[in-house]
Amino acid sequence: MLADAIRLLLFPALMSFAASSDLITMTISNRVSLILIAGFFVLAVMVGMPPTAIGMHVAASATVLVVAFIFFARGWIGGGDAKLAAATALWLGFDQLLNYLIFASLFGGLSRSRSCASA
């Protein structure tokens, strides 16, 4: 029951907070990413996720982190965006990663183009 509450509330609440914070202040707190990471590992242990599955989720997160920090270094995204993307990839794993990256890039690009048009 507690695992279901964590799964159904923690991830969506933190992602909503990160999105609203990014829209309003153009920053994403490191705490959001850290809580997402800790929440994943707590939930993984609670539901009995096999170590190999946890490792694959960590590999997905590490892959996204490396690519996202290349994007950050080139000035294409912010550092908070890179960290949040990696923390999100930890929750999604490789199974849902492509869908997430496509939607995040589309909505991120739409958001950026609207903010540039209004400036």
Image: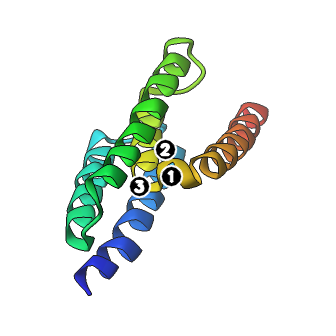
In the figure, residue 108 lies in which quadrant?
Answer: top right
Q: Identify the residue position indicated by label 2 in the image.
A: 22
Query: As rendered, which of 25 and 29 lies closer to the eye?
Result: 29
Task: Specify whether residue 5 is in view.
Answer: yes
Quarter of the image containing the N terminus? bottom left
Q: Residues within 10 Å of mark 3 (few under 14, many from 20)?
A: many
Q: Identify the residue position indicated by label 3 in the image.
A: 91
Q: Residue at x 47, y 41 (%)?
A: 85
- Mark 1 or 3: in front is 3
Query: As rendered, which of 111 and 68 lies closer to the eye?
Result: 68
Q: Residues within 10 Å of mark 2 (few under 14, many from 20)?
A: some
Task: Specify whether residue 27 is in view.
Answer: no
**Callout 2–callout 1 Cβ contact below 8 Å:** yes
Label 2 – label 3 distance at C-alpha? 20 Å
Q: Position of residue 73 (x, y in %)?
A: 49, 13
Q: Position of residue 91 (x, y in %)?
A: 41, 55
Q: Residue at x 33, y 42 (%)?
A: 29
Q: Identify the residue position indicated by label 1 in the image.
A: 19
Of the image marks 2 and 3, the number of the one nearer the N terminus: 2
Quarter of the image containing the C terminus? top right
Query: As rendered, which of 111 and 77 lies closer to the eye?
Result: 77
Q: Secondary structure at mark 2?
A: helix
